[in-house]
Image: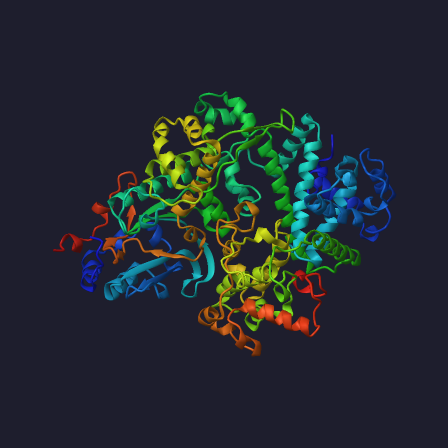
Amino acid sequence: MFKTATLEERRRYYREEWSEKDLPKFITDELRMREFGFDHLGHGPNDRYKVFRGKDSLRRFLRYKTPFAAYISVAFYNNPRRRGDWIKSEYVFDVDAKDLPIRSCDCDGVCEICLSEALEIVNNLIDTLESDLGIKNIHLIYSGRGYHIRILDDDIMDSDSELRSEILKYVAGAEVPKLKYGNISEGSGSSYNFEHFSIPIAYPKVFTKRLKYNIQHLKGTEEIDDINKKLLKDIIKNRDLLEDNQWGIFRSKIGPRRYKNMVTGMARVNLATIDAKVSIDLKRILRLPTSLHSKVSMKCVEVKDREWFDPFKSAVPKFVEERE
Amino acid sequence: MVLLSFINPLSEEGQEIVKEKGNLENVFSSNDELIYIATHDKRQNIDDDSLIPESYGDLAIKRIQWYIERKNNKNFNNDDYSYLFNEKITEADVISFHLISQAIATKLSPNSREARFFVESQGKIIEERIVKLPEQERKEIVNRILNQLIFQESINWKFLKELVASKKISLTDLVLDEGNIILDKEDFINRFGNKFKDRAPDRMYDIIIGDSIKELILTKMIMQNTENYLQKIREMSSKIEVHPAISELSEKIAQSISELTSKYSGFYGVGVSEGSMKIGKLIKEAFPPCIATTVEGVSSGGRNDAIVLLLTSFVSYARLYPAIFRNEGVDVKISDIDPNLTITLNEILPLIYEAADNCSPPLFDDQPQEKINITSKLGFGMYENPELDHEGETTWYTPMSCEKIKMHLPQLCRPDKLCAKIGNPLSYYSRAKWLMEKEGKSANNGNSNNNGNSNND
């Protein structure tokens, strides 16, 4: 596995295994409003601006061309062939297992460990999108080396990059929660300080959860801005306290100034966990679910049960199983 | 009880005041009632006649002046503008508000820095007026205005998505549950009561939400509505003839803002080298051909790189740190030279945005995310606007070399004689400036007569 697929293997995949029935409904619903892109030689998607009238013409194209990679736009256009007259775009979170800034494995590309950590991260993101922000119509796609969260919520789809980047910051935990809370009823001068872990609701809760995840997955070899080697070591030394959420004691062991450095550094790690460029781009193309990721010989598939999904059961093409 | 329009000049009551008393014939005529209110305010400083607004037009200008002074002047004295916070001024204030809106929307632009200062000043005025109200009245006024602004029982954050997108409100400051913004105490306790172990939930409500989020939403909604109002006037303005008094007011506003910002952007740069490498106002005449062409707008197919990569880095370094290539390895941030970002926001960005608008099609029309990319190339992370808090999240990009420009943007490279001697557009700029100085074409410092080009929005 994880070897590049040969032309013959690609052919076998698209002629014997691929079926238009596997295309998710959210893709086929308005197929003709999307732009398609293809990479025929493995040099990147340079055959773009393609349009298909329906599943049949897409099937014929894939069978005949057996592309190295196939992509579909997140955008819907009145004139997709020229990317003209943009209507709306899916909102996407791209979490690539090989680019995770904190991961427990030592692999070069992707492996079972980092893929399952990527899944845990996307599950957390989706939980926050649903429970806090009330966002609907969320689809999860295994992309071959990571995950795409693809959101078709009408209220978000027509929005601009600015709104998208604001949602991203909330969901990712990319901002340090405010410390000071004003209190009007006791006069305008008074205010309270609350560390994120003292507030078990709203954004501070999201941030605390992301922070805990990061700390528990540290290996000790990471290079993180604002967190030097000594601090990293001390975080790891004391992280057992977080098992029982003893954040106050944890913070006092780290020391208030260094704790501040830690949260600032971790907010950046949270941002780097997601490829933000993809989320704010209104005209991006993403791997077509059901297509083959030829570089690693895995299928790009929709994840139906995100708690139990295992790419090694659901995304391995037959030719890989039959390889010598 | 103060009038609702003291806080929200866009309320129906405010519109009525304008209809009844707003008369464009007396925008600049001396207004005894207004002078009386201002001079009889208990806290008002009356030593200096120039502090007292004499007419609606004058008050309009002073509203914005107050904001800029308050933000930049270390010795600012609020008693110089105390009348702005006196509820007796409401009617005149509402009329002035609508006058500024007309002046900016018709003669300047809803995206101009004048508009930005106006909207920001409105936000600050509301904040300070609310704070000064007695507690009970404050609660009541806030609730009454919010009821006018928000029609639903509970608000979904998506209802305020414009405010979120323009960063007037951060999602992270709100208490959100299933998409709803929790404002009501009972609702809060029902939803989160069992989450608090060591503290009483009603007490936590007072601290986390209390009235502060309501006031935040109210203030920001009025700011957003002001922006929308400017846009609406702008759209309608093509059909009507602009009254001369409005034209005069817009000129005065622009002039007053120019004077104040140049007063507060006076600075002396960090140790950079001598001669033409000095920090100073942008001199368009010294731009190399590739930059001059970019400023005029680039057509599709190279727009993004030309504006985001080439122009952004060039203009920012040319304005703030032209000696960067002489001092290679020096780690410098924009705020080292422009500590309040006054130059960045008022000179550098307007020029870049203008060039983006000149592109065909205009760059931000179909690629609004490029604004974020511009901010990021200036070193301020992935945000729409540069803010000091985010500085350092990304790197301040140095300008592309000529070699790179030839590769990425060949259509812009139309070398002239001077180009043969340099390898980077910034060196061209410094050299051209030096030559101009030698020939006596330009004064030798930043406050020269050549500052017009950056303020032409």
Q: Can residue B111 be seen in this snapshot?
A: no
B20 left or right of B310 in image: right
Give coordinates of residue A64: x percent, y percent: 24, 66
Above or below B46: residue B206:
above
Quarter where residue A172 is shown: top left
Tag count in the figure? 0
Identify which residue, B310 or B164, lies in the foreground. B310
Above or below A260: residue A279:
below
Q: Residue at x 69, y 60 (%)?
A: B239
Above or below B366: residue A223:
above
Q: Residue at x 46, y 35 (%)?
A: A258
Which residue in the rendered view is the most extreme toward the bottom?
B417
In this figure, which colouring scheme has been used for the structure?
rainbow
Give coordinates of residue A115: x percent, y percent: 28, 45
Quarter where residue A59 is shown: bottom left
Give coordinates of residue A112: x percent, y percent: 24, 45
A180 left or right of A24 in image: right
B414 left or right of B50 in image: left
Q: Can residue B57 be seen in this snapshot?
A: yes
Give coordinates of residue B145: x percent, y percent: 65, 35
Identify which residue, A229 or B203, lies in the foreground. A229
Q: Residue at x 64, y 73 (%)?
A: B435
Quarter of the image that includes the C terminus of chain A: bottom left
Which residue in the rendered view is the most extreme toward the left?
A324
